[in-house]
Image: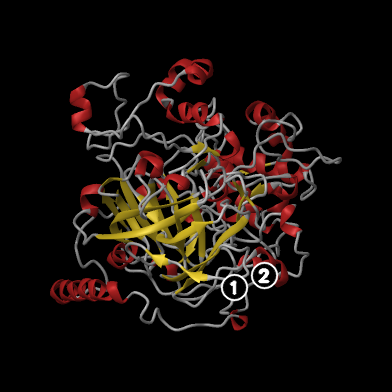
Amino acid sequence: MVSKKSPTTKRAADSTKASRRKFLATGAAAAALGAVQTTAVPATAGQTPAPEAKSLSDLIAYGERSQYVKSVRVPVDERPSPDEFGLTFHVLTPLQDSVGVITPSSLHFIGTHRGSIVPDINPNEHRLLIHGMVDRPLEFSMDDLRRFPAVSRVHFIECLGNHSKAKDKTVQETHGLTSCSEWTGVLLSTLLKECGVQKGASWVVSEGAEEVKGAGSIRLAKAMDDCIAAYGQNGEAVRPQQGFPLRLVVPGFEGIYNTKWLRRIKVVDRYYMTYNDYGHISKNEEVAALTFQWGPKSVITFPSGGQTLPGPGVYQLTGLAWSGGGVVRRVEVSTDGGETWKDAEIRGAVHPKAHTRFGMDWKWDGRECVLQSRCTDSLGQVQPSRAELAAFFKVSPDYYQTHGVQGTDNTIQPWRVASDGSVHNAI
Amino acid sequence: MRFKSSSLSFRGAEGDEESRFSFGVALTAMILCLCCGGVASAQSSTYGTYGVGKTPTPEEIRAEDITISPDGKNLPPGKGTAKEGAEIFAQKCAACHGENGYGGMAPILIKPETPVKSSAPCLAPCIGPGSVIPLHAPYATVLWDYINRAMPFRQEGSLKPDEVYALTAFLFYKNGVIKEDEVLDQTTLPKVKMPNRDGYAIPDWKPGMPRPFPNKH
């Protein structure tokens, strides 16, 4: 796959890998220089920093990718993450390098409430407390949770902040705050039924165990629908950056509701308006209605911004499509700036509320062109262009050059292929 | 303010959308029903079909439950004034938020008379000059709850209720929401008239519900 990495990529990657423990132990200066990779291996004893150089037996015990594979996450706007205080901020998934629909756990995007320190939780001591408007409040250990029937489901998680901006160059920058995993755990509805939800309950507030105890509110209807208290991610324990040992997965909803390090769930009778909820409110009813659930969305990952085509000829145009409303039914691709559209093939498994891979043979004739994709989901919703969104909100077509998109941004992403083969963001 | 459900076109259940999963779901439901039937008939209970988990004591729940309702439910006893809050702010908050509540490395807490560009990064959620929490939060409890659970940096959860009431009073006073001598406590805090009280809409949501835009082409 053809890709061009920004000069900051290496530094950013090193910063991302820097050990939090080392940070805390030796301070910011050492951490800024420190590129000591620690691999947190989720095990019953908790996460343990690995030795600085890995022995062969370590590599046998837990494998690593080839040294020639360089795909890495980068922080949003190159903000160091963790920063000098050890706080982790938003970090982007390298979608341009992705194949299939599963995001490797190591490359899953990161977002935290406020910017928080990834906690080091011993799963043997971790508990999930469910209380509030229930007949019987209950506290579950991780072993308790494994005594309930498990589900394994493939779902994307996408942050509200996943907005494509004109200054963004690569698909990692425009769309890297979405990732897709197979999540394993207990349906939240199973746990809530075990506790017996009382009449009059209408919302649940979930809370994490990290230092800021990030909390978010979802409607009881969603909690009883398809949410998962997940302890597994892609066949192993959920990674610490993703909420080890337990996280809430709220399929199809904004990322912030997918509470990590899930510690407590309170069943309540009204919208509680936590700090995180407050940060997302809008007085405009139409904007508010575009939050919660992601609309149909897609993006071409090859060719995409920052990549270069070596010359005319046949390529595999490919990308990802997903929707918070259900299954991807159709993906269309335009290679002429939206004049004509052609159905792409769905290549691989199709899961509800999950990344879905599409692709098509594409012959580039060497002339400048604009590529874009458009997703239709099982609710009949069709991914809009920014012009359509502007018309809906009655703003000028160039409004989004200077303003953010209202609600969750699921607009069509155009890529311009220049005659020299270079690919650019044409939003 | 609530989202008007009448303006949305409701659709039925998922239809054939998840046909490949329906068998698994049906099977799970069947198994659950069998379990329910088997155990529930013995216990004759509306809940508790697996009998897994520990029942926490009310004290254990109280020790954990820091979730505050907008109507003040679950606020602990205690009280504080802006004057008391000013001292605590200087000691525990000013280093990050700025001596005057702005211009620091952490988000703006006191809206300055002349706008300043926030030096703080846009965090999640993004707190800028237009969304200063004591002014933008629709309920006074939002500020109380967040100070209580997440401040001060590195000593989260260490503040006593009196200190949280005092800091909340201080920030409301400095933003012109309450008077300097007002005492905030369990009763008075939820009654603070917030300038942005009606500043939000909550969308309806049901399984299988499309968003209002885009509509079907």
Residue shown at the point (23%, 66%) measured from the top left: B48
Residue shown at the point (21%, 53%) measured from the top left: A146
Distance between the alpha carbons at the discs numbered 1 and 2: 9 Å
Q: Position of residue B34 (x, y in %)?
A: 15, 75
Q: Position of residue A310 (x, y in %)?
A: 51, 43
Quadrant hosting residue B159? top right
| Label 1 environment density (alpha carbons within 10 Å; few <14, some 14–19, many ≥20) | many
Please report, as a chain letter, where disc 2 is located: A
Looking at the figure, which quarter contains the N terminus of chain A? Answer: top left
Q: Position of residue A326 (x, y in %)?
A: 42, 70
SS at mark 2 in the image: helix
Q: Position of residue A122 (x, y in %)?
A: 29, 36
Q: Which residue is mark 2?
A: A388
Pointers 1 and 2 in contact (CB under 8 A)? yes
Q: Which residue is mark 1?
A: B214
Residue shown at the point (40%, 61%) measured from the top left: A354
Quadrant hosting residue A316? bottom left
From what the image shows, is residue A146 above or below residue A149?
A: above
- The numbered mark at residue A384 is none
SS at mark 1 in the image: loop
From what the image shows, is residue A214 above or below residue B120?
A: below
State the residue in front, B217 or B113. B217
State the residue in front, B203 or A66. A66
Q: Which residue type does callout 2 highlight?
A: Glu
